[in-house]
Amino acid sequence: MSVADPARMTCPPPRPEPGTVLLGHGSGGQLSADLLHDVILPAFGPAGAVPEDAALLSVDGAHLALSTDAYVVNPLFFPGGDIGTLAVHGTINDLAMMGATPVALALAFVIEEGVPVADLSRICTSAATAAEAAGTRIVTGDTKVVGRGAADGLFVTTTGVGRRLPGAAVSAAAARPGDVVLLSGPIAAHGTAIIGAREALGFDSAIVSDTRALHRLVVAMIATAGPAVHTMRDPTRGGVASALNEIAVASRVGVEIDEVTLPVPGPVAAACDLLGLDPLHVAGEGCLAAIVTADAADGLLAAMRSTVEGQHTVAVGRVVPEHPGRVVLRTVVGGRRIVDPLVGEQLPRIC
Amino acid sequence: MSVADPARMTCPPPRPEPGTVLLGHGSGGQLSADLLHDVILPAFGPAGAVPEDAALLSVDGAHLALSTDAYVVNPLFFPGGDIGTLAVHGTINDLAMMGATPVALALAFVIEEGVPVADLSRICTSAATAAEAAGTRIVTGDTKVVGRGAADGLFVTTTGVGRRLPGAAVSAAAARPGDVVLLSGPIAAHGTAIIGAREALGFDSAIVSDTRALHRLVVAMIATAGPAVHTMRDPTRGGVASALNEIAVASRVGVEIDEVTLPVPGPVAAACDLLGLDPLHVAGEGCLAAIVTADAADGLLAAMRSTVEGQHTVAVGRVVPEHPGRVVLRTVVGGRRIVDPLVGEQLPRIC
């Protein structure tokens, strides 16, 4: 190999220092799972705990759920919403994925000195409006300000307290062979909209974030089928691929999905193609994947389609006893490929 | 005035852009109150809401409190604790100030790429240990990672769900003329320890943060005097001055405190003197100010002194009908001066 070999002349990517936190640790994919299992759960969790979207609590007879999420999306304002709407919807959805409806939200800001007060005000209004539309309220909060360069704009952490729906018994560990995989709507819109806004790529303006609250859809699902809804997960960071892999691992089952059934809107598919992204790895913020018993699937499909949030629900696959812990895609041409969870970081700061 | 006048040769301080968020908006003092009243509460709150340390909720018969706080302390590790201990104690204390004991905590990290995993692990362990010592648990969490330069190290937002103590009826708006002001221990230790650690000022090593959980002290207080405890507030950002001013404003009363009774440890007083700080404006993280009826004051003083956290409790003043909304200090030499809330920012990122 000559010294002029072009492959040797390009700079290697910066090598991460060993033992430091990497961007990929926040991806929602495999590195996130590693950090959770190697560092965070050993400190906090009972050994072998299944990571769920929200914790369940019972206090004086009240059956509650608690969930927290930090939002660092960049840019703060994007087609279809802003960090305020996203922070409210995302936390409501984490409660909903555990079968709970929101009772109250708490919002904590970390703001970089120099952020326009008008931006903060707009974000507060967005968050309050999103909460009200979802039938809940932001009841408490906190504001910290750090110097210029000590944060990038504004971060929000939203915590939600929810009331568990009677009849809900969902868990990432509850998927069983024979179950059907339902997807409540198009995937990958949020991540594509963010990367488009950030890079000013001038995508088709039809790509807007799908950020929305899903708890009313969940109420309809639990009312229809109760404990026949085994698992729900909203495919945010890491996309459908990571969500289904988490379920496959936690439930020790295989998951098979059919590429032909996957609802990827045309402009989103085109944008992902352009960017070299697999839509299965790109976040949505307004759809959910549900693993339900085969008996209940038709009734649930009808019930979900009767809601605004779930009108585009489709069945995309099934749970199988083979290849536990793995997700397999049956391709359009009839082939099969393993769908890995996202490894590393694809689109930092999409939520 | 000649052009060589040295006063003209020094650079003026950077002038804040109008309409932007300033460091002082995170101080816990007057600018924080302005931002809250002008921007945040109009979006979220019912008009005229009293800002309390925690929101009260009733869900299916359970009487709960909810509080959230973002922690951005710099450095992450300091004498007496780290951001993990602080984030647990601070949120437990916000619940306690509303008469509630912690049921569960949620923790959300925003981490700058490159933070050592060992630091994150140590902080998780500190937080888990602090929670366990306080009889509660961190039940859920989230981790986001941002690129280098997009955050300064690591931020934590802690949210607490608490159970309200029967008999507790505290509010910042409930102080009444004739009430007595109790202070559960020495003030200003945390802020002094942080600035000492940050600036490597080589203070007397006796100055360590007083970060601790106060809910057991509050349990003893409510068990002793119930609704005779009108108001509690922990003087964190903005110090005792801001805490008492908030109470004076919310309750529309005057507060008078006696300088001679104020518990400022010698090394803390010396350090504040050196730095030109008023200890009344410097944060503690392990004491509380309580406004209680005169009848109950002696019994409470005894009950508080019988606890570990409250063993140094003193009476420092009283509530008066004069000068509503103002705090007045009777000085050692018999003079009187108005104690303003902190204006602007004195010690950024102390919590």
Image (cartoon, coloured by chain):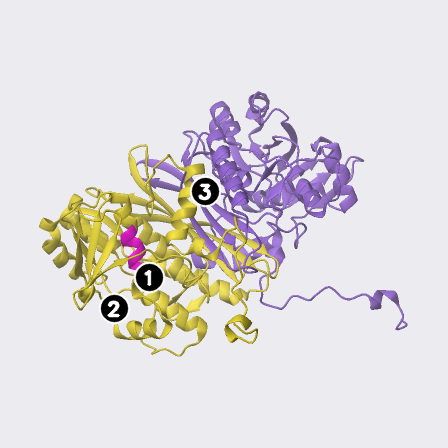
Chain colours: A purple, B yellow
Whether tag 2 and tag 1 are in contact, CB under 8 A, the answer is no
| x and y, in percent, of residue A28 in the image | 59, 49
Quadrant of the snapshot with the C terminus of chain A: top right
Residue A116 in the image: above or below residue A229 = below
Closer to viewer: mark 2 or mark 3: 3
Distance between mark 1 and mark 3 Cα atoms: 24 Å
Tell me the residue that label 3 is attached to. Answer: B39
| x and y, in percent, of residue A192 in the image | 69, 41
Which subunit holds the residue at mark 3?
B
Q: Amino acid at mark 1?
A: His
Is B184 one of the magenta-colored residues? no
Tell me the residue that label 1 is attached to. Answer: B281
Q: Amino acid at mark 2?
A: Val
Tell me the residue that label 2 is attached to. Answer: B264
Relative placement, left or right, of B270 versus B230 is right
Relative depth, front residue between A340 and B32: B32
Magenta segment, which residues? B239-245
Whether callout 2 and callout 3 share a subunit is answered yes
